[in-house]
Image (spheres, coloured by chain):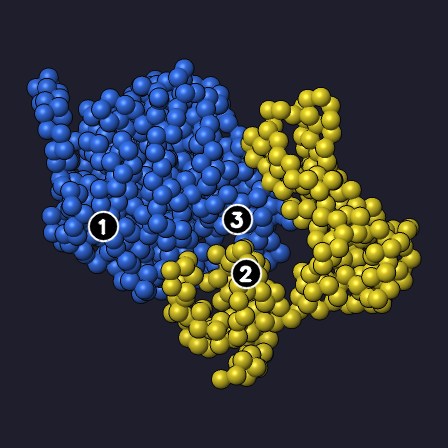
Amino acid sequence: MRPAALAAQHETAADLLDGERAFRNNCANCHGPDGDQIAGIDLGRGRFRRQMSDDDLVRIIRTGIPNTPMPATSMTVEQAQKIVAYLRSRAATAKTGTIAGDAVRGKALFEGKGSCTSCHRVAGVGSRVGPDLTTIGMTRGAADLERSLLDPDADVQPNNRFYRVVLRDGTTIDGRLLSHDTFTVQLLDTREQLRSFSKSDLRQSGFIKSPMPSSRGTLSAQELADLVSYLASLR
Amino acid sequence: MTFRILLGVLFAAASLQAQVSFDRILHGDREPQNWLSYSRTPTNQRYSPLTQITTANVKNLQLQWIWQARSLEKFEATPLVVDGVMYTVQAPNDIVALDAATGRPFWTSPYTPAPEARACCGRVNRGVAILGDTLYMETLDAHLVAVDAKSGQPLWKTKVANAADRYSMTGSPLVVKDKVIVGTGGGDGPIRGFIAAYDARKGKELWRFYTIPGPGEPGHDTWSGDSWKSGGVGVWNAGAYDEETNLVFFGTGNPAPDWDGSTRLGDNLYSDSVVALDADTGTLKWHYQFTPHDELDYDSTQVPVLADIEWQGQPRKVMLWANRNGVMYVLDRTTGEFLKGKPYVKANWLDGFDAHGRPHRVKFPSAEGTLIYPHVHGATNWAPPAFSPRTGWFYVASWENSGTTAIAGQFPRAASSNNRQTAMGQTNLVPFTNDDTEPFGVVRAYDPRTLEPKWEFKMDDITWGGTLVTASDLVFSGGREGYFLALDARTGALLWKAPVGGQINAGAMSYSVNGKQYVAIAAGNALFAYALP
């Protein structure tokens, strides 16, 4: 059976709802409610560790993957197909955004007037201090991107948080927090150096606001739309 | 009495590598060098009488050996040590015998679970039990296996339940007299859980107690319709045994389906409970349900801890319980009487108890989502706590400030964008970027008489690790950050730490060989043993 035919059989709203319910009851315990809790796998966005056809997914849901925590289930082919259809529908929705603006103009803004590359990196160009945006269009919709540009502190992903340490001699070092524990802190500092500190050597340490400036008042509505369009095209 | 002690001393001294009788297991305090049961003795106090490592010299602890498992699964097992030989489990189900002084392997007894074996939360195992010259292990494919402790040769294998029906087994068996008592996991799926006793010699089933009452049995009416047939209620952690009353105690798991309580109306007995069973017959003597009609996976499979304490001026035989639901309990272990219950972390799902100890629940999953504390993963989970008869305090590693958004009939959501789900423990260290608004791990000492904390040691990251307390007033613990910690049992002060390069998902244990005390902890995929130089 061809993958397209598989999905087409289960595109009714009721089937997708069934698929969602089955996903939440059977899969979400390990994969998480959004399907993105296992490294390298984002079920809600159609990302797997290797290319997966719908047939592959149905088979894995039913038989599991030997020698991994992915168990077999007693689901029928039809039940598994509904889960796959639900995941595909989510992935399709996730990629859809209301894109306005001109991506080419947006790219010019990104690299020029916007000075975005002073912190961000796309395809190997730009700074590593802020989040790498090479595939940001795959994980963020237009509305999210616009909000991040206008209100950078509103929703900072935990792995993009900024942190400040103050050494005993008063030296202050800011950077993107890579990890911390009870005794140590690891940063990528603003000079793109990987730094690790023992908290016992610090006078002070803690989270700080995102250094990203708001585009509000600095970019016109059209420029903002262009920039969002460019970012959404990065996949 | 004098004769018994004398006999015990002579027995221990004269017969190195003697068979492990039940009397030895029951009276483990007579042989401080050994660790003969999951939490050392069937009281589950996880209290080591050894005193060579002290609060003064613990800072000098040095790594003695590492044993690396050929397994990528979480290492949740607590080893046994019998007269210098250590027994542990390489997940999912290989039993390994090691020289406890050097970590060198004597043998591995491999066991491959059948392909239909499934587990909700990792292909793990929490350790073996021993009686005589035989080791006992629960398997992921729901069998009880017996292996010769000297050679590793399999002796027998009994099917406890049908793995294809989603039963699995991951706990450490409880040995009582001539029986091996086990529980069936898999309660996140449509099983009907049970506890069963097997003849230690041949593996024949001797009694069975279903954790969901059948038609005509008391409690059956706490399940609507046919929901009792597939209502879950697994049992997947070690039980306890009280010699005086001849009762075994087990904590039971959540009802299934986990989140959709509408299909199983009622209290759903004996889910999220402790059941006290006659050790000889499996007859239910009493029960206490911690979380009636659970809709947040508040398994109560924590190991029961039995202690004799002073209660309102009188000696009392109690059971201490730090529950996944965020509440700590003191029960009379002879009668099951509820003596006290109190949240020990941020918990908002109840606002008190009635006179019988039934919680008054005030938060319910809703269509729009209800913020409920603690998180679905709970205040604590499988990791074992400890009790010190010296300090009289209960030592618990837990998650603080963990909430979840409970949506009726659905997998609970993260409480906020910053309050995320986490996998149920992993082996490797992972970048950690939570801020102060998010859940954190903490080790606390509680006075069981008040359930008030006496001290706390706060970690940045959460913990899936347990606690060990020693007669020299040391508490050993650790968590997801991958540090093995030694704390002062009276003050909580950090006295020593060692980075172990992997997450700690188990409880520590202590033993001695040739007069040298060791402390062992599983972390990542390896087992680490420390001692003084």
**Residue B388 screen position, x and y as percent:** 34, 24
**Residue B119 screen position, x and y as percent:** 37, 56
- Cα–Cα span, label 2 and label 3: 15 Å
Q: Give chain B's shade.
A: blue
| Mark 1 lies on residue | B109
| Residue in the picture at 29% in, 52% down | B93
Mark identifier at residue B383: none
- Cα–Cα span, label 3 and label 1: 33 Å
- Cα–Cα span, label 2 and label 1: 34 Å
A139 to B270, vertically: above or below = below
Q: Mark 2, mark 3: which one is toward the viewer?
A: 2
Q: Quadrant of residue B3?
A: top left
Residue A107 seen in the figure: yes
The residue lying furthest to the top in this view is B56
Packing grade of label 1 (10 A; few <14, some 14-19, many >=20) is some
Give the amino acid at mark 3: Thr
**Residue A197 screen position, x and y as percent:** 62, 31
Give the amino acid at mark 1: Ser
Packing grade of label 2 (10 A; few <14, some 14-19, many >=20) is some
| Mark 3 lies on residue | B422
Give the amino acid at mark 2: Ile
**Residue A201 screen position, x and y as percent:** 62, 24
Q: Which is more N-terminal, label 1 or label 3?
A: 1
Residue B221 seen in the figure: no
Is residue B498 toward the left or the right of residue B390 in the image? right
A211 to A221, vertically: above or below = above
Q: Chain of mark 2?
A: A
| Mark 2 lies on residue | A41
Q: Chain of mark 3?
A: B
Q: Quadrant of the N terminus of chain B?
A: top left
Q: Chain of mark 1?
A: B
